[in-house]
Structures are given as C-alpha cells and as structure tokens.
Amino acid sequence: MNLKKLIQKTRHISQAFFFIFFTAVVVGAVCSFVIGSVEVVEPLGALQILVASGASIPQSTLLVFVSATAIFIFVTILLGRAWCAWACPIGTITEFTEHVMNKRRFKPLVERRPRIPLKAEEGRIWSKEVKYFTLSAVIISSAVTRTPSWCSFCPIGTICRGTVAGSFVAGAEMAIVGAVLAANVYEKRFFCKYICPVAGLLTLISRFNFFIKPRVKREECRSCGACAVICPEGLMVCEEKTFAECTKCFVCYSKCPYGVISIGLTGRK
Amino acid sequence: MNRRGFLLSITSFLALSITLTLTNIRQSKAIRPPGVVNEDNFFSLCIRCNRCADVCPTKGIKPDNSSLFTLGTPILDGYCAVYLDLVEPTPSKNRAFKRIKSSAELCFRCIDTCPTGALESVDVEELKMGEAEVNRSLCLAWTHNICYRCVDICVFDAVKITARGGVEVNRSVCVGCQQCEYICPVPEKAIRVKLSDYTSEGQRLRSRRGQV
C-alpha cells in the first residue's frame, strides 16, 4: 500500500476511534471530558458561558476555562483545524454518508456540475464567511437569553449525548443530525464548511498555524482546478495562500490527478 | 465575498440569531438533578455535556427531550440515590440504613463532575429537588391500609403514617429524591414528586432550620 492510501486509512481509523471514544467510552461528550486529571471544555461552550453568565460566573469555572482555552489555542496553532477531519464525530458521519452516496451515484450537486470551477468560490452561492456570522449570532443570542444557546442545537453534542444516554430516537435530536447529513446532498461537508460555529472559531485561530500544510510543485501544476472539487473544504489548493480553512485531511495529496501536491512540515512553498 | 453571498450571510445571521433567541425562552417544569440551586444560574452555565448523566450510579439523570430549549439539559427521570449505599433502594435496606445515615458516604457525583459549576455543591441538609405528593385515590395505604413501602424507603423520614392509616408527606423535610416514586407498586404511581411552588420560582434550596 502506498503512502497516499495509507494516510487516508490512518485518518479513517482515527475518526472511527474518536467516534467510539466520544460517544461510548468517555464520561461526558465533546463539550467537556476528562483525560487523566486534565479537564477539557469545548471552547465554544466556554465562550458562550462567559457571555451568558457574565460577572456571576463561579471562580472555579473560570479557572477550568482558562486552562481549557490555553490547551485549545496551543493545539490549534500546532495542528490547525485537524480536529474537523481527524476526530469530530459529525465530520466522521458526514464523510461516511458521502462515501455511501458516492457508491450509489448520489454525488453532491455541486460536484455533479460538468465544468470544473476556475476559482474555488465560483458556482457556490454560500460563502464560507457564513460560519463567522453563525458564531456571532450564537454569541449575541447567548448574551440576550443568558443561556449557551447553541448547545441545544449543536449536532456534535447531540450525537454524543444521544448515543450515550439512549435517547437517540428522540425526534428533535434526530432531526438536527438528519438535517446536517441531508445538506451533504447539496455540497459535501456543507455543515462543516458553511455553518458550524466551532469550525468558525477554529478557523479564526488557525490563521496563526504554520505547520503541516499542502505544498504545490508550481512548475508541474496544470491549474486544472480538480483540487477545489476534491477538497472537502472546497479550497483551491494550488492558489490558496493561508490555508486557515485546511483541515489537514490530506485528500488533496492523495487524490491530485497529477500528483503535484505534497505535504510540507512548514507552510513555506 | 460577492454581493449575493454577503446578503445571504446577513440574512442567515439575522434568521439564526432570531431563531436562537426565540427558542431559548426560559420555560421548564422539570425535576433537576441535585445541585441546581437556581434555575436561572443553571441555564446560563449548563453546556449540556451530560457528564452528570454518565457518572450517575442509578442512571436516573437523563437528557431532556421535552422542548427545543431544554434539549439536552439534565433532568432527574429516575431516582436520586443521595447516599452511595442507596443505589438500589429496597424498604428493608433503607430502614437499616437510617441508623448509619449520619456516617454514610454521600454520592453527589454529578456535582463533582460538572465542569462549569452549573451544579453547585450543596449540603444534604439544604438539598431540594422537588416535593412528593400522595394521590389518595390510588394509594394502597389510603384505600386498603396496606403497603407502606414509601414510609420505609424514605431515609429523610418525610413520609409519615397518619392516624387513619394513610400516608402523608412532610413537605418541608422531603428532598424530592424520587425513591418513593421508584418503589411505589401502583403502576400509575400513587406517590409522585413534583416541583413545589417554592422551587418553581427558581430557588431550589430549602432551609431546614427549626426542623430535625
């Protein structure tokens, strides 16, 4: 097996491992869990609570949040949005449904179009900035209602608590996850790409991430634009500069038709 | 970002913030796990991670599915053991337990595991989740003068036998642990824990001053 296939196999194993870990093994959910004596709190939850409870927040909670935020920023600067492609349960099941859809000739609508887009944004109505708007909407409504208001909708949390507590059949929760999966028919990883506020928060910080980025051999690249179709995040890899959106899934490396994309440890081209 | 994308973003932003705000209107009559002292504080701190449901030894804490706003917040949908020895309460076990109650180990694992402080640490003397109510037309003690399992199982001595042979709940002593509801043999449950007027106002703590 060559490296291109091996890296995707490794990624799928990692996704399966984290899916089982978060839904069945760990006490709690992605939102908050303990490894050894380290408390991990999901940064969006922490942010919403800070906004929602303001000055009345307990001191011990604040301490947990400070350490959680420090861990989060450190990991994001080191690995960027790797969470989305390697561990997130929603990312895992969306990718799984895509796999099934492709097998059964249900390719996402955007991919089914005959022409290959010349720019990544071309032919797409939705813009990737929508997730920043979601993020700010969540924070504003948390402040207004004094409740972490995204938490009742969050499909990531829904998956974790649903499978653990055996209430997975509950209609409302299923509907949320179902809607996320159904959006894949329009475009692959629709929710992760455009809506998810956690991805918005990660992207904001992964601008400062300088490690493990796709590298393009300029002289051999034929600018075919296939990378923009292949990439789950819809990045035009051969023209991308910052790679803030890159989820380190290495699909571009594995599937570039001319094999000109490699992975560099640092971002320099 | 092109103009179309920008307009779409603004529209979705407004739609989402309005939806989130409208669906997060505070309405809850649920029995909460121990440690929910103030319903408002609880809602501003709970991130619905369900760690409390995972650590609960009786599996009595479950995520709420009753409304979109409360989706995933923990509710007490079983019974609360309060003490670690009472994970599977039986009338005889609880009757023997009352003698060693003062030295017994408290459970409160949900409070210990809560990462955000949504469940505050409470004294067992102040604990209040709800209040039990007896339905006299269903209760076997009132109709046939038999059973009395709730009297035996209540380690807080809140359920008392009346002169007529029925059972009555001393509301100020009851913590609302739902063990009586769990053990009640009547299928429709003749004794049920409900939120009292006092607790539904938001404050879920009692003062047992003057009580034994």
Image (spheres, coloured by chain):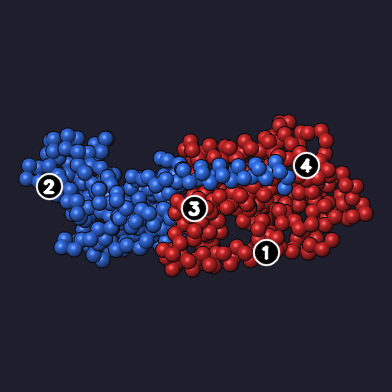
Q: Residue at x 52, y 53 (%)?
A: A140
Could you tell me which chain the residue with mark 1 belongs to?
A: A
Label 2 and label 4: CA atoms lie apart by 77 Å
Instruction: Give the mark nearest the N terminus, 3 or 1.
Output: 1
Tell me the CA gap for discs 3 and 1: 27 Å
Residue A122 image label: 4
Q: Is residue B62 above or below residue A210?
A: above
For chain B, the rendered hue is: blue
Q: What distance separates the C-alpha of mark 1 from that of mark 2?
A: 66 Å
Callout 3–callout 2 Cβ contact below 8 Å? no
Left or right of B2 in this view: A182: left
Disc 4 secondary structure class:
loop
**Where is mark 1, residue-wise?**
A77
| Foreground residue among B38 and A249 | B38
User: Which residue occupies the extreme right position in the image?
Assistant: A219
Tag 3 and tag 2 share a subunit: no
